[in-house]
Image (cartoon, rainbow, N blue to C red):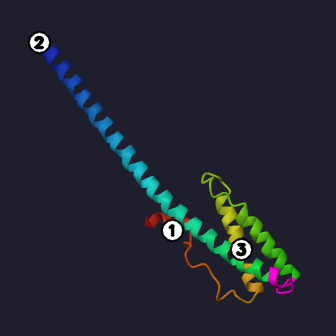
């Protein structure tokens, strides 16, 4: 009978140690996962903010030029500048879980390339800071 109690207490001790180790590992993983997630989020958020800022800066220059001389750009280019301004203004910087973010950023980039090409600036005015693909960027972190 003592042998049975001894084995039972050994099994319970083993299970108890296993559960304690599992809980410790789980808690440590949660902490390091949160830290890593925060770092990735900060880096990606900074990159997005930097890119949106670049486009807004270009828009500010173009709209200032239009205010100084309404005939600076054709009406078609002015319409595209307005469209880009709407895209940039409506980009949800404070909603990182919005499923449309990537599509919206691609629309901004495309509209910017079209305007740059219309102005003959496509080879000189480009945003160099954005990653080639978001998947590639996340792999380097």
Q: Position of residue 141 (x, y in %)?
A: 43, 64
- In the rendered view, tell whether residue 55 sits above or below residue 27: below
In-front residue for pair 23/59: 59
Per the image, the residue denoted by label 1 is 136
Q: Quadrant of residue 52?
A: bottom right
Per the image, the residue denoted by label 2 is 2
Q: Give the magenta range.
A: 67-74
Q: Position of residue 140 (x, y in %)?
A: 44, 67
Q: Residues within 10 Å of mark 1 (few under 14, many from 20)?
A: few
Examine the residues drawn in magenta and state their main secondary structure. Answer: loop
Q: CA distance from mark 1 to mark 3?
A: 20 Å
Q: Residues within 10 Å of mark 3 (few under 14, many from 20)?
A: few
Q: Residues within 10 Å of mark 2 (few under 14, many from 20)?
A: few
Q: Position of residue 51 (x, y in %)?
A: 60, 71
Compare marks 1 and 2 and give the one earlier in the sequence: 2
Q: Secondary structure at mark 2?
A: helix
């Amino acid at each position: 009978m003592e042998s049975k109690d001894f084995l039972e207490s050994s099994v319970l001790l083993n299970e108890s140690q296993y559960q304690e180790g599992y809980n410790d590992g789980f808690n440590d993983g949660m902490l390091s996962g949160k830290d890593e997630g925060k770092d990735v989020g900060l880096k990606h958020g900074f990159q997005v903010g930097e890119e949106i800022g670049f486009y807004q800066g270009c828009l500010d220059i173009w709209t200032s030029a239009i205010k100084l001389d309404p005939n600076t750009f054709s009406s078609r280019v002015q319409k595209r500048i307005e469209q880009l301004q709407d895209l940039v203004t409506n980009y949800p910087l404070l909603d990182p879980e919005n499923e449309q973010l990537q599509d919206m950023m691609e629309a901004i980039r495309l509209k910017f390339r079209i305007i740059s090409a219309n102005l003959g600036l496509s080879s000189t005015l480009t945003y160099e800071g954005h990653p080639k693909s978001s998947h590639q960027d996340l792999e380097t972190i």
